[in-house]
Amino acid sequence: MSDPELWCVYDDHPLVAETGNKIDDPRFAAKLSAFSHLHLNMFEIILNEAPNPAKSHQENQSDIWLNYFHDTLSRSRRIEKLLKIRKVSGFGARLFWLTTDGGRPCLTKG
């Protein structure tokens, strides 16, 4: 958690360019995978406890977290890929379902 290079899970993070070939190292890739799992676990727990998304124009906690998650997916191919793997394996299917929004994956509380 204290390693700043873990933020390389985000494709646009400045450290990605500085990390170079280290991203291909199996040990570092395993760390990035674990950090990606941590992100998904955080979202599953929070969205499971948050109320359903608002139907009105005013956002509630679920809307804010869903927006944050969609932003995360758009910035991290690694987390997006992990979410697809979880969906296929059935892990987390009880809490969320994967849909597409204009060809881009998105998470919806289900």
Image: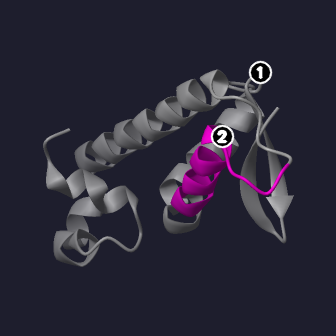
Question: Which mark sits nearer the N-terminus, 2 or 1?
Answer: 2
Inter-mark Cα distance, 2 to 1: 17 Å
Q: Where is residue 15 drawn, in percent x and y?
A: 21, 70
Depth check, mark 2 against mark 1: the one in front is 2
- Residue 108 percent across, percent down from the top left: 77, 43
Placement of 11 over or under 50, stated as above or below: below
| Residue annotated with mark 2 | 62
In the displayed structure image, the side of residue 46 where residue 7 appears, left or right: left
Q: What residue sits 31% from the left and 61% below the top?
A: 8
Q: Choose between 61 and 38: the one closer to the eye.
A: 61
Going by the numbered disc 2, the residue's amino acid type is Ser
Q: Amino acid at mark 1?
A: Arg
For numbered disc 1, what is the local secondary structure?
A: loop
Report the front residue among 95 and 9.
Answer: 95
Position of the N terminus by quadrant: top left
Provide residue 80's location: percent of width, then percent of height.
Answer: 59, 54
CB within 8 Å, label 2 to label 1 = no
Say which residue appears at 73% left-offset and 36% top-offset: 87
Residue 55 is inside the magenta segment: no
Main secondary structure type of the part rendered in magenta: helix
Q: Is residue 5 above or below residue 97?
A: below
Within-10-Å neighbours for mark 1: few <14, some 14–19, many 20+:
few
Q: Residue at x 24, y 78 (%)?
A: 17
Question: Which stretch is magenta?
Answer: 56-72
Q: Is residue 59 magenta?
A: yes
Q: Tag on residue 94? A: 1
- Which sits in the foreground, 59 or 107? 59
110 left or right of 43 in image: right
| Vertical relation: 40 (above or below) 71 | above
Indicate left or right for 103 with 43 as reference: right
